[in-house]
Amino acid sequence: MARLNSPEDLEKLRQEVLSRNDPKRPCISICAGTGCIACGAAGVVSAFEEDLRRQGLGDKADVKRTGCHGFCEQGPAVVVHPDGVFYARVKPEDVPEIVSRTIKEKKVVERLLYVDPATGQRVVHESEIQFFEKQKRLVLGSNSRIDPGSIEDYLAVGGYSALVKVLRTMSPEKVISDIKESGLRGRSGSGFPAGRKWEACRNAEGETKYVICNCHEGDPGAFVDRMMMEANPHLVLEGMIIGAYSMAAHDGYIFVGGEFPLTVENVGIAIRQAEEHGLLGQNILGSGFDFTVRLSIDGGSYVCGESTALMASMDGRVGEPIRKYDHATERGLRARPTVLNNLQTWANVPLIINQGVERYRSIGTSGSKGTKVFSLTGAVVNTGMVEVPMGATLKEIVFDIGGGVRGGGKFKALQVGGPLGGFVPENQLNLKVDFDELGKAGLSMGPSLVVMDENACIVDTVKYFVTFLSDESCGKCTPCREVFRQILKVLNRISGGRGREGDIELLKELSDVQRDATLCALGQGAPSPIDSALAHFRDEFEAHIGEKRCPAGVCRGLSAAGPR
Amino acid sequence: MGIVTLTIDNREVKAEEGMTVLEAARGAGIEIPTLCWHEKLKPYTVCRICVVDVDARGWTSLDTACSRPVKEGLVVRTRSAKIDRIRKTILELLLAHAPDSPKLREYASEYGADRDRFEKDPSFCIDCGLCVRYCAEVKKKNAVGFVDRGIRREICFVPEVALRECNGCKECFPLCPTSYLQAAFVLVQALTAPAQPEKP
Ligand SMILES: Cc1cc2nc3c(=O)[nH]c(=O)nc-3n(C[C@H](O)[C@H](O)[C@H](O)COP(=O)(O)O)c2cc1C
Ligand code: SF4
């Protein structure tokens, strides 16, 4: 591929790609995200390729292997464009029928359609499925049209047009003021205004500056960042290039967990393609701006996602937090000005530039703008990756998009924000997806939402989180390490039927010390699940301790009815 | 270096720029307890027993005195109900590991910490890291390091290095607030350099 030497070159290539793409030509898009691969998507892809060839349709339709569409519950998912016919849970045996009926005869294979569990009706189009209909998919919307290994697919959906706009018409200062005005806040859950960080880094002294994309995502059960990166890596790269341009940074890193091989592979391919096209490297699109992106693969623990630990680890030191008195925007990676943003934060940047600040700001609440992507799992009908506008209620996510509790069970709690977050009981599901509102409720906007029904035990879940953190923290500071050790003993005692009077008070006392006296935000946030469990489900702790009973029947050694 | 004036426990204290609150306080005869601090080593901020209340132009927070740089106008309180409660709990948590440590017992009586509050733990190590950091920063040998993380974090000698370096040095031994270090060293010696068995 020839290097693109100007924004005009890029637009020319885009036109070429679009003119090659006949909008009427059938395209079979198969979700081959990590989730669907686990359900056999690879076999479905090759079945389509083979069958098209066998039926002599090899040049009449395209087969596209895409990243995660989001509806993991129904995987492997197949969408036949241009009509957008959606087939759920497709197996290789189903493929010949889809090819003969849908590709050849333009008819629908009824039996493979998704059945709306609420109405019992079969639904033909992806857009009519309630799971998708109730979302606002600004960031995820293109996933089903993009083969993550193809930069041309990204160009076909308008990719890199924000970069073109920036290089053609915007000064670095203008980019920063737009990002500030857009109200974009840190999607890791930090909620920190992105534009403020960028501005501080731009104003910091020094020639060498770094931008980093945090794609560590160590939260148990969360898969949003890695799926987004896996599905649409160029979107993140484009955001990073624009950010780097605004701060005059020339080196970028993507910090990603080595335990996500497909993510690492896809982003590696995307970087190489962007380099070959002159979108990364020296003199990007002839602008005179240089920027390279490298992968930094960590095998580290949960705490490595924390800013100071992450930078230490990238620098070849032990991935442990340290007490610093300078902001990373002044002295970050290798003591140079550095901006660290979450992957979703970067992915929002091209959107803001393309849509313009006004339109972006029109979505969301007064303090939180745009959309937020969560992984939705647990005892819910529709599991998957969901994107909602800020201001959507948790209830809408669980019941409208998620379809409610699986198996008709009774809702107990929504776990929000992972091991540093908390539990939301039914009467608080009107809480909005909003940094400030959730923050005030002691929750965080982390990547995962887990629905718990009556079969889940709160004590057991808290114990799970504490166990996780006690393994995945660094153990450096006393109040974090030793409080975990003691709290685990107390929780084990309670769930084992040996709880004592005073244990709840002891949990609270120890948590207080941990929150107040630890070194990093892991220890400071670790008491959150305990706090919210005790605030909303104290009776469950009391049942375990006083009546030796686990109401959900989960804790081994305790029965749901109590001791015989 | 300039001189700054700060307030510690209602006393005006002068300190050189670049000093920490701990150094300034000790210079003025105000005692703040420490476990992981050592004058030859960089602040490590992990035992957390030196936490103090810091008010920087209305911004109050708890911070470790061993790391916090002095600043003009800083207002520091080294004791409060909250600080004492934190220190007491930290001591009780560590006494579960090293109930006979003289240093811990001395502080325990100051802060009313109950030596037997928590069930005793088999490991004496309190993870202060004095040995690890002394060996790395002062001796530059790295004969002892941390292994594992989270609640399983502990110090461990690197046998090949320790056999070569430690017998002639042992400078870290007196730094250990518990007697864990010697025990760990003897263990490593026993495991890696067993007395030559006599040939039958
Ligand atoms: C224990 C711990 C783990 C974290 N893990 C992550 C992570 O996996 N991904 C992430 O983006 N941020 C993580 N963070 C937050 C980062 O430190 C940092 O604030 C964030 O990447 C900044 O991005 P944002 O401002 O765009 O949200 C973690 C923080 C803590 C304290
Ligand atoms: S709070 Fe926990 S994770 Fe953070 S530095 Fe201390 S021991 Fe490590």
Image (spheres, rainbow, N blue to C red):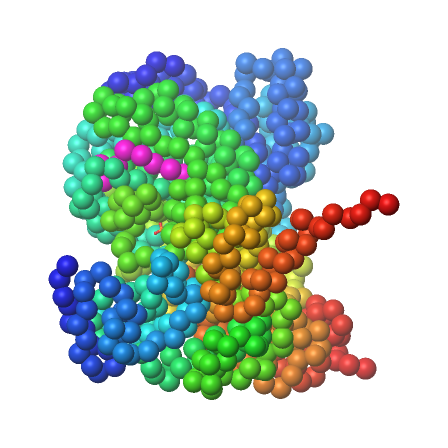
Left/right placement of residue A334 relative to residue B164 reads: left
User: Is residue A429 in view?
Assistant: no
Nearer the observer, B76 or A6: B76
Question: Is residue A249 in the magenta section?
Answer: yes
Q: Position of residue A349 (x, y in %)?
A: 31, 42
- Coordinates of residue A15 in the picture (x, y in percent): 33, 19
Magenta segment: A246-254
**Does B173 appear in magenta?**
no
Residue A160's x, y, as percent?
32, 30
Using the rendered image of the protein, determine whether residue A506 is visible from the camera's viewpoint: yes
Q: Is residue A557 above or below residue A121?
A: below
Is residue B98 shown above or below A196? below
Query: In terms of depth relative to the viewer, which is nearer, A334 or A431?
Result: A334
Check the image and report above or below for B52 versus A80: below
Is B151 in front, or is B12? B12
As drawn, A282 above or below A58: below
User: In terms of depth relative to the viewer, which is nearer, A532 or A379?
Assistant: A532
Tell me what residue is drawn at x 30 percent, y 18 percent: A4
